[in-house]
Amino acid sequence: MHEYDVVIVGGGPGGLNAAIAAGRLGARTLLVERYAFLGGMSTAALVYPWMTFHDMQGQQIVRGIPQEIVDRLTARGASPGHLRDTVGFCHSVTPFDKEVFKQIAVEMVREAGADLLLHALAAETRVAAGKIDAVTVVGPYGRLQVRGDVFVDGTGDCGLVAMAGGSTLLGRPADGKVQAMTMMMRVGGVDLDAVKAYMVAHPDEFWKDSRIDRLSEWPLTGVSGFFSLWETYGPPEVPRDLVLFFAGVRPGEVHVNTTRVIDRDPTAIEAVTEAEIEGRAQVWPVLSFLQQHVPGFANSYLVETGPQIGIRESRRLQGRRMLTTEDITTGRRFEDVIARNGYQIDIHDPEGKALVSQELLESGYDIPYGALVSSDLRNVLVAGRAISCSVEAFASLRTTPSCMAIGQAAGAAAAMASARGCAPGELDVTALQEALLRQDVHLDLPQ
Ligand SMILES: Cc1cc2nc3c(=O)[nH]c(=O)nc-3n(C[C@H](O)[C@H](O)[C@H](O)COP(=O)(O)OP(=O)(O)OC[C@H]3O[C@@H](n4cnc5c(N)ncnc54)[C@H](O)[C@@H]3O)c2cc1C
């Protein structure tokens, strides 16, 4: 039996930031990840770039450990840092090399003193008196049990909470449907100057907020559109209305976010299997469409797809507090703020071809601590996208920088609750905020 103060399941952006934060505060910390590498959707599903560390006014509102990750990537030539977003989704995007990110993530977790188990699927929980007491971790050739004082669910889909019988939510209130999935593609051999020239000559063919007006000053970071080309030649088996891709960190490379699988339950093995098969099958017609019809792609080729399809949305926590749609559209301030976010409400239609919402938020908004705390499991916090929130709030906070910021707060809270011998729900939030401020987290607390 292994014993820890803090056990974190899931090494995605949320979980790995939680492990670094908990380890740095001196907690005996274990991070458990089912894959052989860290990074979650950023590495396992090629999700790219990170959006966004800024609010729409350009103020940087995600800092702390997530910014340290960017600084380390930049120092190794694996990220240019924050660049302006030419698609018009948000203020900045942050390109990164996922292979270097994998390396840095492990280094930072180990430097923080946290232990790591890879190839380790958390498959069972032991619950006693409303608390998770132990998790059974299954590897290729065996299993082991891990006991913990506080558990952090970084699975991205509240997998740990659900296994332990805690309360979760799934999808739209009316029908439980979740956002579309996408098999991301990394494509090389692209002539981005030809893409740019086409955009300047055909501005109406692109997403309405595209910053074609700034292409002479800003590097081209993303492209959304080619409406007529897609309508005329786009593969009919892909339920999408446009082409979306982002410029890679290497010359001539782009990350294509255009395949789309709808109406699949991310929590059902059979449905996810079908989604993987369908998503992978769409890669080839999309590639062929790009090569034959899109300016700049004539000599392009597929570099890679991810080990898995990108799953945008899955279960969410039923927490002490639920972050509502109104909270984020009005920029509501919370006394128990632990992170801020400035990304828009971005919903990939669960049933159709389009984005059903693209609401740009004027300002950033607070993420309250209560949304990380399970309502019924007394020693469980959530790190990452699966916190307690409405479907629309989820569609905003789901992007990577905010998941990292939430993860840092969850890890710090777990370490502090364990050290103080209290439940996470009883933690003194002012002390947590002070600890986060010392770690350069931006909370914008009222003076
Ligand atoms: C197609 C797509 C496009 C996106 N586009 C963008 C974008 O352009 N920019 C952006 O910033 N964000 C984007 N996002 C959102 C972002 O990638 C995710 O919301 C974010 O990665 C969530 O982080 P997380 O840590 O909560 O979960 P995840 O990234 O899902 O990580 C969860 C981790 O937990 C592990 N895990 C799960 N269950 C277990 C278990 N039982 N045992 C052990 N390990 C387990 C997984 O292997 C994974 O490593 C996109 C997402 C998708 C799917």
Image (cartoon, rainbow, N blue to C red):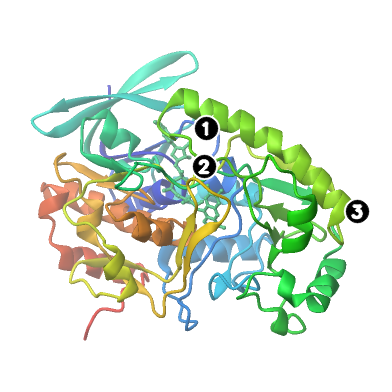
Looking at the rendered image, the disc whose residue lies closer to the viewer, 3 or 1, is: 3
| Amino acid type indicated by mark 1 | Tyr
Q: Are marks 1 and 2 in contact (CB under 8 Å)?
A: yes
Mark 1 surroundings: few (<14), some (14-19) or many (≥20) residues within 10 A: some
Measured Cα–Cα span from mark 2 to mark 3: 34 Å
Tell me the element at label 2.
Answer: loop
Tell me the element at label 3.
Answer: loop
Q: Is residue 25 visible?
A: no
Residue 393's place in the image compared with 259, above or below, is below
Q: Quadrant of the N terminus?
A: top left
Count of numbered marks = 3
| Amino acid type indicated by mark 3 | Ala
Residue 26 on image: x %, y %: 29, 50
Q: In front: 323, or 240? A: 240
Ligand 1 neighbours mark 2 (CB distance < 8 Å): yes
Ligand 1 neighbours mark 1 (CB distance < 8 Å): yes
Residue 127 on image: x %, y %: 17, 27
In this rendering, would 338 be left or right of 149?
right
Which mark, by number, is residue 298? 3
Residue 373's place in the image compared with 62, above or below, is above
Tell me the element at label 1.
Answer: loop
Q: Label 2, on which residue?
A: 38
Which mark, by number, is residue 35? 1
Q: Choose the circle earlier in sequence order: 3 or 1.
A: 1
